Image (cartoon, grey):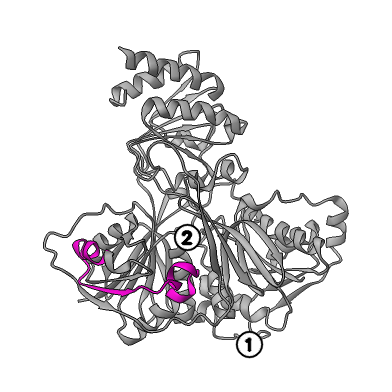
């Protein structure tokens, strides 16, 4: 059982995000960059599958050279090797270029399953996994809170508006996992040391036959404006001195709720 | 006039509420066509027409209900090729996201997610999406040839029937659905019933987060909700931890709600959550951390211990109702 896990390096979600007013792009300078916490669950899901069975977890990412740190974090958790698609022409890529680059970079790899987070914590569009599935001609099992693999099939519990659906697809398939699927392990010191010696292959667009077909050359959209949303009027913040409940009840009365 | 298509998700022939919102927006942008797929879809045509669809494509094959995304993508790709619209809009739902994303890869056209508004702009579209939990509004313009695909968040638009709606022209499709390729098939559906009003429709919502400390503490939320006639919601952290079923989740990957009053208990206010509730008219928050971002949104914020305040609040509400 070989698993590919797609990951993304993002600005620390605990630090408030900023857009550059000139370029309308995410400010990455002076912000800690981390492996997307949502992707840690994807790495964990991959590791659990190969630990049950034999096989390897390969981590793949697209980003600037420093995105290798996010891959190393996944390697420290126990993944076996990494691939980083990095090319100046990919700067400011939209989702479809990212999906194309990943699809091209994994050509020739053998895998049974591709695992991704449902969406990045910074961009939240969640388009790449489905686009990747479409480009590879694979079924997509999305929004999985539970994942089981056996008999050449993958089965998930898929989140819905009023519960969940049990959905099945033959392998190979693409799966997106929610944070509820597992508790992601914390890398041990030994894992961190071992990660330093694990292979991370770096490839550019010409290496994967995509020169001129992804990134800047293939933009599908342009951000033309970014303005702060109208802030909610500042409310009243009070400290509970035993009268907190009364204050809330008074307010509810004022709102004619009670 | 621009051609605008709406991906009209239906359940047993009833359009999902977001579909009526999409149609309301679509008809202000151009000549509107709805595409309704799956068993019972024909029944939805009248309602779709009432909300502005001039044409309704119907295909009732059960594969649209029982197989994730791919049959809809195949059909939409064929329809788009035959008679290309300028814009196709989808609800930012579980299925809407899968279908729109796959279709964008198939067509190679722009996909813009999380949108709350669309306007015509110089022969293209200006699409507004909130970022960072709604603190920033980003306007994106598609620049590819071919139809732009836009995912609109539920409750971003208020659904209203069209003023002058005639019966729509219904085009019933019967072309075979290819199910020979490897597909993701739904084996069964599990419904997690909640008591009280539905989250999506509730005027009052009582919502709990990690600050509640343990799943059994949701009992006091149920009690408070029962007193107020409110629905109970939860943050992703709580749902991910297995304290509450998925159907309670409010936020980016859960439900978008717009109640009159939203009471956030032990919720820090991570962006993932606030994007799904900041449209509430009034927000009340109780949290022990004075720095919690939820207080930036709250009309009334109480810095204190939910375990102490909520039981007192239940008593307060009871005694005032008694008067």
Q: What stretch is highlighted in magenta?
A: B44-72
Q: Is residue B105 magenta?
A: no
| Residue underneath mark 1 | A209
- Frontmost residue, A97 versus A65: A97
In the image, B39: left or right of A70? Answer: left
| Residue underneath mark 2 | B94
Q: Is residue B57 magenta?
A: yes
**Residue at x 37% of width, y 54% of height:** B154
Q: Which chain carries label 1?
A: A
**Residue at x 75% of width, y 58% of height:** A73
Quadrant for the C terminus of chain A in the image = top left
Q: Position of residue A145 (x, y in %)?
A: 61, 54
- Frontmost residue, A2 versus A202: A2
Occupied quadrant, residue A97 = bottom right
Occupied quadrant, residue B25 = bottom left
Quadrant for the N terminus of chain A in the image = bottom right
Q: Is residue B116 visible?
A: yes
Q: Is residue B118 above or below residue B143?
A: above
**Residue at x 60% of width, y 85% of height:** A210
Q: In this view, does A94 lie above or below B175?
A: above
């Amino acid at each position: 059982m070989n698993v590919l896990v797609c990951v993304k390096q993002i600005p620390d979600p605990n630090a408030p995000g900023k857009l550059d007013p000139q370029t309308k792009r995410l400010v990455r300078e002076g912000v800690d960059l981390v492996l997307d916490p949502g992707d840690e669950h994807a790495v964990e899901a991959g590791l659990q599958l190969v630990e049950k069975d034999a096989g390897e977890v390969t981590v793949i990412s697209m980003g600037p050279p420093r995105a290798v740190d996010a891959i190393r974090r996944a390697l420290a958790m126990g993944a076996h090797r990494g691939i980083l698609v990095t090319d100046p022409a990919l700067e400011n890529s939209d989702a479809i270029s990212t999906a194309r680059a990943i699809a091209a970079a994994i050509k020739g790899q053998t895998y049974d399953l591709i695992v991704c987070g449902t969406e990045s914590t910074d961009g939240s569009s969640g388009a790449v996994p489905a686009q990747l599935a479409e480009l590879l001609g694979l079924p997509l099992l999305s929004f999985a809170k539970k994942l089981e693999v056996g008999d050449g099939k993958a089965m998930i519990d898929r989140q819905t508006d009023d519960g969940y659906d049990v959905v099945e697809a033959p392998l190979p398939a693409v799966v997106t996992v929610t944070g509820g699927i597992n508790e992601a392990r914390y890398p041990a010191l030994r894992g961190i040391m071992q990660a330093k010696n694990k292979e991370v292959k770096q490839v550019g667009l010409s290496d994967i036959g995509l020169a001129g077909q992804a990134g800047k050359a293939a933009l599908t959209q342009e951000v033309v404006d970014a303005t702060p949303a109208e802030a909610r009027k500042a409310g009243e913040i009070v400290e509970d001195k035993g009268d907190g409940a009364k204050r809330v009840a008074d307010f509810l009365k004022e709102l004619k709720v009670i | 006039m621009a051609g605008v298509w709406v991906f009209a998700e239906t359940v047993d022939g009833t359009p999902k509420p977001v579909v009526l919102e999409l149609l309301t927006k679509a008809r202000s942008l151009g000549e509107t066509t709805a595409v309704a797929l799956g068993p019972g879809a024909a029944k939805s045509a009248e309602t779709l027409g009432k909300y502005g669809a001039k044409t309704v494509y119907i295909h009732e094959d059960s594969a649209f209900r029982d197989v994730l995304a791919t049959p809809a993508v195949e059909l939409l790709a064929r329809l788009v090729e035959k008679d290309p619209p300028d814009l196709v809009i989808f609800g930012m739902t579980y299925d809407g996201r899968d279908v729109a994303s796959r279709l964008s890869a198939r067509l190679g056209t722009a996909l813009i997610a999380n949108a709350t508004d669309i306007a015509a702009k110089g022969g293209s579209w200006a699409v507004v999406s909130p970022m960072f939990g709604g603190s920033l509004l980003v306007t994106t313009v598609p620049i590819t040839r071919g139809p732009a695909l836009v995912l609109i968040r539920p409750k971003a638009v208020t659904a209203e029937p069209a003023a002058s709606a005639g019966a729509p022209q219904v085009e019933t499709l019967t072309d075979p659905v290819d199910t020979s390729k490897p597909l993701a098939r739904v084996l069964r559906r599990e419904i997690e019933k909640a008591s009280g009003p539905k989250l999506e429709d509730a005027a009052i919502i009582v919502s709990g987060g990690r600050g509640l400390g343990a799943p059994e503490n949701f009992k006091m939320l149920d009690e408070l909700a029962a007193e107020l006639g409110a629905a109970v919601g939860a943050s992703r952290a709580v749902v991910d931890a297995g304290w509450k079923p998925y159907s309670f989740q409010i936020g980016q990957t859960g439900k978008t709600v717009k109640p009159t009053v939203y009471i956030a208990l032990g919720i820090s206010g991570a962006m993932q959550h606030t994007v799904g509730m900041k449209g509430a008219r009034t927000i009340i928050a109780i949290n022990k951390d004075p720095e919690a971002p939820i207080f930036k949104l709250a009309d009334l914020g109480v810095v204190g211990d939910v375990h102490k305040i909520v039981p007192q609040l239940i008593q307060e509400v009871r005694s005032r109702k008694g008067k």
